[in-house]
Amino acid sequence: MVASISQLIGKVNPKLYAKNGKNLLKEYGSIEAIPAEKVDPQALFLGKDGAEVHHKLIYDSSSETLEPVYFFIIDLMNDFGLELEKLIDNFTSSPGSGHFAELGQRATIMQQQGTKILGDINTVLRSVLNIIYDLKDFKLRLSQYDELKASKKEAALLSLKQIWMDKVDIQKGNSSIKAMTMGQMGFQTLIDAFLFAKDIQDVDKIDLNDRVKRILRARVLEFNHWLEQSEKELRKRYEIEKAYLKSQVNSLKLYSRWAKPYLKIASDLEMAERGRDPALVKAFNTIVLELILLGKKKIDTKDEAISGNLPPDFERLKTKDYYACVLVSFRFRGIPQRIGQQSHYTFGGRSEISFRPYALNEDELKKLNEELESSDLGDVFRLIQGATDESLEQIQDEINFFLEEKEGDEKYKASKDTSNPFMALFGKYNSKQPAKEKKIEQNKKITLKSETYAEKEYVRPLAAEMAKDLAFKFFDIYKKAHGMPSFT
């Protein structure tokens, strides 16, 4: 079962916003271990012995749609200076409705387009992997040519001679050096002589018969020519492969950017699972919408102290940021009706709007966002994010190694282009933070710091009173604006 937003808030602060908070803390020991589904949520209370503050509006009209109700409340909350965030936005249509078929077709189109681009991404990704492996081989071979000009010249030359015998000379078949040494009498010393001789002059100094020397001179001359030409060709091929790698990486970024909107829209068009909700009958033409908004207003302790709502000392006292928060929940049950020949629908039906006040500090809001991401509410985002695991980060390191390589410099830096094509699916470009540091930061749990006496006794109660006042004002203003009866 998916935890509700009220339950997640109750998990973040079980002492204030969970009716069973004491029992949960006693049973599980810490808020991290508390299952959000087991929280019995509650909002602020009117007083120590008062009732829970929960204002609810019910508006039932087959001709009125949800949009005016929704945007009226949004504009009202903005007018009061609240910062709004949409936490939940989902819908479910009954299988027998035309709306279900219409959105099902749209979702299928988005899924097909996203899948096609993901297939292209996989093709380019395989190409990138092959190029990286080829560049590693080139790098290893070129290091032997570099050693010819360094202190390990003798060893590098012997290594290149072995490569030449195994890759080039072996194509001569029975007349190759290895074949003649192993299979023909009188040529047993041919390999040793070839490895010893550096040029034709060295061949003349070796104590060998003329038949072996004639073959050896040709092989040494051929090897020296190959040595000069192969290095040029190998370095040229190495640069071409690097240019091709850069092209493929840019294509990968582009495809990833193209795929993101299709994947996001496809996930947005997915219907929520409502199980045994009686409002949804398979053969009916019905829809259920759920929207949850969180509005928050920061408490300015300095201004409140000047206004007299806090003691004068709060003008200089530093405290955590506290917010007066109002959680607004919309539940709409309606009948979709097509507008003429267009592919748009209007929804007339029953709207239920509830207002719940909370007083939360900055740490609790961060913890709430963390719980939203780790709960089932964030599973779609995690599916898209699944491509960014440790192996892909390692591939990105390899890409940076070759693309940022400087000519004539053996030390390579990874600070020129830190954009990860595999992270492009969810918009993380041009990040200046190293991948390892990001991973550590993502895995780091947010810990709630204990409140000071001033915060607990003064700032939070002030935020609570402001939240309760705002929740009632939103409820009351909407009720009066629409001529609704006076009830809460």
Image (tube, helix red, strand yellow):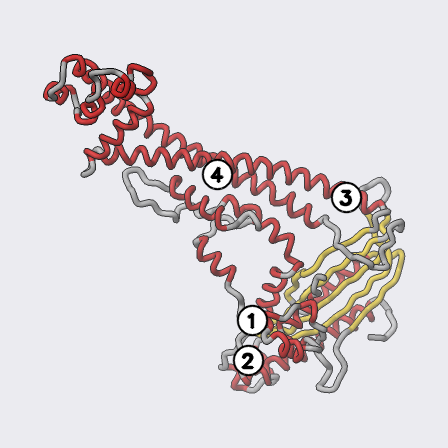
Q: Secondary structure at mark 1?
A: helix
- Do tag 4 and tag 2 residues touch (Cβ < 8 Å)? no
Determine whether 211 is above or below 450 in the image.
above
Residue type at mark 2? Glu
Label 1 neighbour load within 10 Å: few <14, some 14-19, many 20+: some
33 or 316, which is in the foreground? 33
Instruction: State which quarter of the image contains the C terminus.
Output: bottom right
Rounded to the nearest angstrom, the CA distance separating label 1 from label 4 is 39 Å
Residue 465 locus on image (x, y percent) = 68, 80
289 sits to left or right of 18:
right
Label 3 neighbour load within 10 Å: few <14, some 14-19, many 20+: some
Rounded to the nearest angstrom, the CA distance separating label 2 from label 1 is 10 Å
Mark 1 — residue? Answer: 363
Mark 2 — residue? Answer: 451
Of the numbered discs 3 and 1, the one sitting upstream in the chain is 3
62 sits to left or right of 120:
right
Determine whether 316 is above or below 328 in the image.
below
- Do tag 2 and tag 1 residues touch (Cβ < 8 Å)? no
| Picture disc at residue 104 | 3
385 or 199, which is in the foreground? 199
Of the numbered discs 4 and 2, the one sitting upstream in the chain is 4
Q: Secondary structure at mark 3?
A: helix
Q: Is there any visible trace of residue 463 in the rendered image?
A: no
Residue 429 locus on image (x, y percent) = 50, 48
Rounded to the nearest angstrom, the CA distance separating label 3 from label 2 is 49 Å
What residue sits 27% from the left and 38% below the top?
408
Residue 41 locus on image (x, y percent) = 71, 73
What residue sits 68% from the left and 76% below the top?
17
Residue type at mark 1? Asp
